[in-house]
Structures are given as structure tokens and as C-alpha cells.
């Protein structure tokens, strides 16, 4: 059975003064970890802009196509970090770590890293989009034009030299790349997939004629039926070769963005026809009763019967942005596109948003049947024998025996299927949706951010750069929405972890993952270079703060302390709590803190713990007001307490406890797993909150504790009591 170790979010109501006593349980690993001098963290933290510039400078100097007979300025996407060279064949590139923490006792789902999704031997600008965005941003921030100039060179060459003369398509996306050794387009593995355009490429100003050919290439050689609009996300690059059944909304939205760009540029009437054809297709894919939109037309229980929330939200945002492009030429078409996008919000949030966006309860619903909006775990086989609802904590099957909604498809720290990634899609909808939906999206975004205030990455299992980048981007956005600096402090904390996980003295290139030591930039696989863009943005956010507010203050344990003589509420008595505190304190595994003595009020604090306060990292944040304020009374407040990584394991240590690395893609099935938690985190197992009634009236107080594990909430506990004037109570 897999152990669950919860962190906690605490809600309380009282007029009070607060102090805490905590019992953190130490992990099996020793405290701390030596970090190389290149990434050692002084008190002011890493220089994020310097790290990002070092990467960009290295790519400009060493990350170009200097291979084969034809050299080019295009940037390569995969390199050996030790030699700075591109691998010569896919056989040279190992299969990376993909195991994730079991989502339920006995079950796990691995990161979907497929051989035909990896561009081993060359360049793939569409998957490497974050690199180009970084270079342009660095020019804006530093004034050094060379960064943008090098991006321009690479883009111009790729657009001019790699487009198929037969179809107008490019060797990019999930399943193709430009092989710099052979100077030709290649399929990643075998002949699987072909051309797939599933991200929005914005840099067509470098070659407008290439945009025209690509726009018509998508219409002529990706769309199989120009009457119905049916297509497959995959098409043949070198000749006409189309299919139907896999009309994923995300892919279609990218096509419509291209057609909108060409329509805006040239007024080409065929682009207007293409846009209206796909709008008609997706209207036909909506259920007439529920309005839910299928994610494709292929037959199968997890195909045309099912709706993909995340793809739908991506489509809505992309369509609204594309509508703005055609507004000047085709106002009626622009309105049609915007209305279609807004209808996606209407459908998603029309059936009780408390259920579809129950972030703090059962998670975010991401797949459901279109006929009755029944939650569904897309792509999963039924659970193995011996795994039942009781052991998991929620239904694995519906009444008719089909797989039920599952939190194992969307989790806080799952590569490419994270809560943060979903919240970022909702953030874009929040910025564009009708006013009537803003409250629902905002609540879900804030609740998702609050989960990351309590849970650090699961470093026993593999972590990818996009895991950190998505969380940092979310926390930065919530800081901008709320102006609560604790979210920015937490973003900084997460990024510092990212520096420790992916960087060393060997090379400015980041590792593909926390356990795999080569460079492989891929948005599809969770190892894009978005982490650098977030570093640069975070550095600017922090610099904009007053110097004394750029980090949460640290609070030392009180040298001598005892639980105040006061009554306690709940089954965990003061005497029992005090005995446990003393026993744990003897081992350096407990502490007591009083934030009231801070030199300045702060919404968050870092608690030092362990013997002589050697450990630093128990993170305490407060939603309303601040710690250490002169008037701490509040009728209601919320605090969140995080777990703490006590050691980042080496690859060998992680393999030893998690059973070694996989050697290849395991498919979609749920995998039986007996991997145990190995103790690389310190997690609080008991917390005492001492409340003092500072009012003149007797007060009833109630403490509600929401326990999180790393995938979903793990229960709610409530303790209540009453306090007379100037009295104390231990909860």
C-alpha cells in the first residue's frame, strides 16, 4: 500500500493571537543537499536573468546546425550536455525516467513519453517555441539586439528551406523534425504521425509567402473533406495523405489561427471558407441536448462520445484571439468565431461549476461523456483485480461498469497533466470570458494556486522543467490578480527548486528531467524552455518589490517553550500533544514558533526547524492580513502549511527505491505499483494552534483543517471550542 503524507491548509475563526507548535516527521533521507557552486543559493537567491542569458548565449554559440553538408542558423533541440553535440541517432539517446508517484494505493500512471514524440537528431522550432520567445524577450529587457537577430536568422532559414514543395507543410510538431546530419525532414520514429500542427506559431512576418503556402497546405493536404471539414491531426508531409476521425479541438484551433492570419494578410476568400467549414464541423460535434462537444469523430467509448475540457478551453482562447485578426476584413466572421468560443465557456460552466471545478474537493473534471456529462477517465482500462474503491478513496467505475472520473489523469505534479497546466488554460478563459463566468474561473484558479502553497514536488519521482514552469507561471498570475506577495514568494521558492533540479556546473543547458542528464527541448514532452521565460518574468516581479519584501522572513524556533496551560478541544489533548512535542523535540523533529515578534508584518513566513534550527523550509502563509501585525485580531482567517523537501535524491537513490527506470513507453494502461514513500520530504503530522481571545466577549472558535496529499485532498477535519475573554485554547 502506498502511504499518503498530507500537508495541511488550516481555516480558523476567532478573535485571537496565534502561536504554533508543530511535529514534522522527518523523511528517511538526511537533511540538506550540497549544491554546486554555480547554483548555490545565497540569501538573495539565484540570478535568474543571468541563468537565462547564459542559456541563450550557449545556444547561439553552440546550439546551431553545424552538421551535415549544409550548415544553417537553425537551433537544435537535443544535445549531449557534456559534449555540446547533437546525437547522431535515436539509439544514442536513452529513454528518460517516466515513473510518477502512485495516484492511489497500488496504482500509478507513467509520463506519456513515446519514441515517435521525440526529435532525436535535429531541429523542431514548433516544439522549441519557448526558446524563440525567450530570445525576443531578452532583447526587450537588455537592449541587446543580437538575441532577436539570431532568432530571426533561424526562423527565416527554417521557413524558407524546409517547407514541402508538394504540400506546403513543415517537418515540425510532435512526430517530425529536421535532421541536421542528413539535411532533410525525417519522421521521429518509423512512419508514425507525420505532420502535426498543434501549437500556434506566431512568427510569419519573416516570410509571408510561406504563410500563404502553409495556410493552403493545411486546407488542401490536412483537411480530408472540404465539405464536412473532417480531418486527422496527422497528415503526410511529402505528398498528399490525409485521414479522418482525429479532429482534436486543439489542433483545429491552430489551423484556424493560421487561416485567420492569412485572411487578415491577403483577404483570401478561400481562408474564409476554411474557417467557416471547421466552425460548422464543431457545431455538428455538439450534443443536441447538453451542448457538450466531442473531441473527435472516431468511433469508440473514449472517442466521439467524450469531450476534452482542456482542448476545448485551448480552442476557445485561440479562436477569440484569431477573431481579432480578421475583425478588420470580416467583422461578421469574427463575431461568429467569438460567439463559438464563448459558447464553450457556457457549456463547461452550465452544469454546476462547483462540481466541474471542485479543485479543493475532488479535483478538476477534464473528460466527460457528451450525452449526459458523466465523468470519464479517457484512455484508461478498468482497474486491475484487487484494486477497489475503498482502497483508492473514490469510485473507479460508474454504475454501468465503465471507468469513472479519475484524479489520476490530472494531478498537481504529473508531467503535462498537472493542476497548474489546467489552471493556466482557465486563466486565459478568465481573461476573455463573459463577466458571468469570471467568478467561477477565478475561484478555481485561486484554489489551484493554494494547493501549490502546501505541496512541493515529489522528488522521489521524476520532475520535468515544465512542471516547475507551469506552477511558477500560475503563482505569478495569482499574485497579479490578488496583489498578495506570498504567491510571488512561493513562485520564487519553486523556481529555486527548479534551479537545483535541472542545472549544474557542467553546462548552461538544463537537464531534460531531474534524473536524466541530457538536453531535450520539447513542449510535447514537458521539457520545453518555458522555465527560462518564467525565470526572466519572475526576476522582474521580484525586483519591482521593495527590497525588504522580496522574500518571506524566517522565524526561528523558540529556544525554550511549552504548551501554554490551557484547555484543549478535540480528542488530541494538550497532555498528549505536549508529550509528543517533547519526544520529537529531543530528536530535532519538532518546534514551536510565535510569528508575533516579526520586525515587519508579513503574509508568509519560513519556519526554521531541526536541531539548532538547521533546517529551513516549513512554509506558512496566511490568506488574509499578516503575521506579526500589531492588531492580529480577525474574525476569520486562513493559513497554509507546506511540506518540505529535505533532500533531492540522486538518480541512483531514486532508482533504488522506485524500482529503476522504464525502458520504453508502457501504453495507456494503469500500472500496478508497490512503490513506497522513501522519505525525501518532511511532512507535518501534528499541529497545535493556540488561540487567545483578545475581545471582551466569549467567543466560539472553529478550526477546519483540509489535508492535501500530492494528488487530491485527503480529507477535512474540524475541531471547535469556546474561549472566554483573555483566555487561551489549544486546537
Image (cartoon, rainbow, N blue to C red):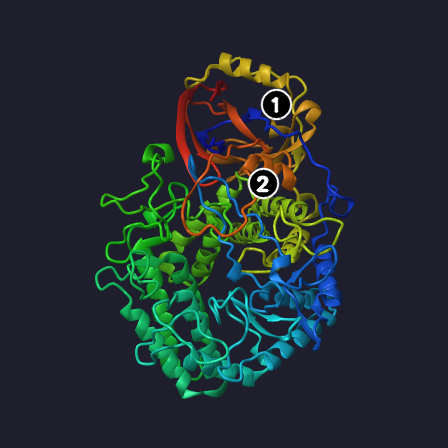
Residue 461's quadrant in the figure? top right
Per the image, the residue denoted by label 1 is 589
Q: Which residue is under mark 2?
A: 459
Q: How many labels does the image show?
A: 2
Figure check: 604 above or below 433: above
- Labelled pair 1, 2 in contact (Cβ < 8 Å): no
| 1 or 2: tag closer to the N-terminus | 2
What whole-number distance in Å separates the C-alpha atoms at marks 1 and 2?
Answer: 21 Å
Q: Quadrant of the N terminus?
A: top left
Instruction: Place residue 530 in its image quadrant.
Output: bottom right
Q: Which of pointers 1 and 2 indicates the residue nearer the eye?
A: 2
Viewer can see residue 320: no
Q: Position of residue 25 (x, y in %)?
A: 56, 25
Q: Is residue 177 above or below residue 376?
A: below
Location of residue 433 in the rendering, given as x and y in whole percent from the top left corner: 40, 62
Q: Nearer the viewer, residue 706 or 507?
A: 507
Residue placed most toward the observer, 428 or 402: 402
Q: Is mark 1 on a helix, strand or loop?
A: loop
- Secondary structure beneath dot 2 equals loop
| Left or right, residue 336 beside residue 549 | left
Q: Where is residue 291 in the image (x, y as percent from the top left)?
A: 27, 62
In this rendering, the answer to whether 523 lies above or below 661 is below
User: In front: 549, or 142?
Assistant: 142
Mark 2 crowdedness (10 Å alpha carbons): few <14, some 14-19, many ≥20: many
Q: Name the one closer to the observer, 420 or 481.
A: 420
Amino acid at each position: 500500500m502506498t502511504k499518503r503524507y498530507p500537508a495541511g491548509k488550516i481555516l480558523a475563526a476567532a478573535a485571537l493571537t496565534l502561536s504554533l507548535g508543530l511535529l514534522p516527521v522527518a523523511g528517511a533521507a538526511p537533511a540538506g543537499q550540497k549544491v554546486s557552486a554555480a547554483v548555490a543559493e545565497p540569501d538573495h537567491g539565484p540570478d535568474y536573468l543571468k541563468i537565462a542569458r547564459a542559456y541563450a548565449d550557449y545556444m547561439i554559440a553552440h546550439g546551431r546546425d553545424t552538421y551535415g553538408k549544409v550548415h544553417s542558423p537553425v537551433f537544435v533541440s537535443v544535445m549531449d550536455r557534456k559534449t555540446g553535440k547533437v546525437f547522431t541517432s535515436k539509439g544514442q539517446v536513452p529513454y528518460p525516467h517516466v515513473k510518477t508517484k502512485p495516484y492511489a494505493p497500488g496504482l500509478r500512471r507513467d509520463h506519456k513519453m513515446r519514441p515517435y514524440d521525440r526529435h532525436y537528431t535535429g531541429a523542431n522550432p514548433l516544439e522549441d517555441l519557448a526558446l524563440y520567445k525567450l530570445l525576443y524577450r531578452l532583447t526587450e529587457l537588455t537592449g541587446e539586439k543580437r538575441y532577436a537577430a539570431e532568432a530571426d536568422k533561424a526562423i527565416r532559414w527554417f521557413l524558407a528551406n524546409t517547407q514541402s514543395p508538394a504540400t506546403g507543410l513543415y517537418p515540425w510538431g510532435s512526430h517530425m523534425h529536421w535532421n541536421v546530419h542528413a539535411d532533410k525532414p525525417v519522421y521521429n520514429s518509423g512512419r508514425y504521425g507525420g505532420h502535426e500542427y498543434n501549437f500556434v506559431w506566431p512568427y510569419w512576418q519573416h516570410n509571408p509567402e510561406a504563410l500563404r503556402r502553409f495556410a493552403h497546405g493545411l486546407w488542401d493536404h490536412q483537411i480530408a473533406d472540404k465539405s464536412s471539414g473532417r480531418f486527422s491531426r496527422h497528415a503526410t508531409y511529402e505528398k498528399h495523405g490525409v485521414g479522418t476521425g482525429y479532429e482534436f479541438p486543439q489542433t483545429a484551433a491552430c489551423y484556424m489561427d493560421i487561416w485567420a492570419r492569412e485572411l487578415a494578410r491577403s483577404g483570401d476568400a478561400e481562408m474564409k471558407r476554411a474557417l467557416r467549414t471547421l466552425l460548422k464541423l464543431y457545431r455538428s460535434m455538439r450534443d443536441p441536448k447538453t451542448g457538450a462537444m466531442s473531441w473527435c469523430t472516431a468511433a469508440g467509448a473514449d472517442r466521439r462520445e467524450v469531450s476534452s475540457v482542456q482542448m476545448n478551453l485551448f480552442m476557445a482562447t485561440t479562436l477569440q484571439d484569431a477573431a481579432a485578426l480578421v475583425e478588420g476584413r470580416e467583422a461578421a466572421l469574427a463575431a461568429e468565431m467569438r460567439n463559438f468560443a464563448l459558447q464553450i465557456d457556457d457549456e463547461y460552466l452550465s452544469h454546476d461549476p462547483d462540481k466541474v471545478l471542485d479543485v479543493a474537493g475532488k479535483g478538476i473534471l477534464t473528460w466527460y461523456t457528451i450525452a449526459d456529462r458523466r465523468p470519464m477517465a479517457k484512455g484508461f482500462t478498468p482497474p486491475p483485480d484487487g484494486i477497489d474503491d475503498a482502497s483508492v478513496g473514490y469510485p473507479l467505475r460508474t454504475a454501468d461498469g465503465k471507468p469513472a472520473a479519475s484524479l489520476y489523469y490530472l494531478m498537481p505534479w504529473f508531467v503535462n497533466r498537472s493542476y497548474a497546466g489546467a489552471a493556466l488554460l482557465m486563466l486565459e478563459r478568465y481573461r476573455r470570458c463573459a463577466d458571468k463566468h469570471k467568478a467561477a474561473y477565478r475561484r478555481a484558479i485561486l484554489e489551484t494556486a493554494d494547493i501549490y502553497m502546501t505541496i512541493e514536488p515529489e522528488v522521489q519521482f521524476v520532475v520535468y522543467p515544465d512542471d516547475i514552469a507551469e506552477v511558477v507561471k500560475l503563482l505569478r498570475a495569482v499574485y497579479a490578480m490578488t496583489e498578495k506577495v506570498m504567491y510571488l514568494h512561493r513562485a520564487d521558492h519553486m523556481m529555486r527548486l527548479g534551479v537545483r533540479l535541472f542545472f549544474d556546473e557542467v553546462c548552461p543547458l538544463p537537464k531534460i528531467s531531474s534524473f536524466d542528464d541530457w538536453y531535450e527541448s520539447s513542449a510535447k514532452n514537458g521539457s520545453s524552455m518555458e522555465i527560462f521565460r518564467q525565470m526572466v518574468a519572475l526576476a522582474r516581479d521580484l525586483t519591482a518589490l521593495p527590497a525588504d519584501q522580496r522574500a518571506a522572513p524566517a522565524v526561528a524556533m523558540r529556544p525554550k517553550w511549552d504548551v501554554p496551560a490551557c484547555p484543549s478541544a478535540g480528542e488530541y489533548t494538550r497532555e498528549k500533544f505536549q508529550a509528543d512535542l517533547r519526544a520529537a523535540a529531543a530528536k530535532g523533529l519538532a518546534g514551536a514558533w510565535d510569528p508575533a515578534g516579526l520586525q515587519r508584518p508579513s503574509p508568509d513566513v519560513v519556519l526554521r526547524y531541526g536541531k539548532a534550527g538547521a533546517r529551513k523550509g516549513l512554509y506558512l502563509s496566511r490568506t488574509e492580513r499578516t503575521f506579526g501585525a500589531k492588531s492580529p485580531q480577525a474574525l476569520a482567517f486562513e493559513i497554509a502549511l507546506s511540506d518540505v523537501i529535505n533532500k533531492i535524491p540522486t538518480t541512483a537513490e531514486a532508482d533504488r527505491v522506485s524500482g529503476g527506470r522504464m525502458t520504453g513507453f508502457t501504453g495507456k494502461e494503469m500500472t500496478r505499483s508497490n512503490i513506497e514513500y522513501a522519505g525525501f520530504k518532511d511532512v507535518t503530522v501534528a499541529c497545535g494552534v493556540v488561540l487567545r481571545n483578545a475581545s471582551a466577549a466569549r467567543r466560539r472558535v472553529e478550526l477546519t483543517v483540509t489535508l492535501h496529499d500530492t494528488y487530491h485532498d485527503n480529507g477535512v477535519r474540524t475541531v471547535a471550542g469556546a474561549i472566554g475573554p483573555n483566555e487561551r485554547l489549544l486546537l
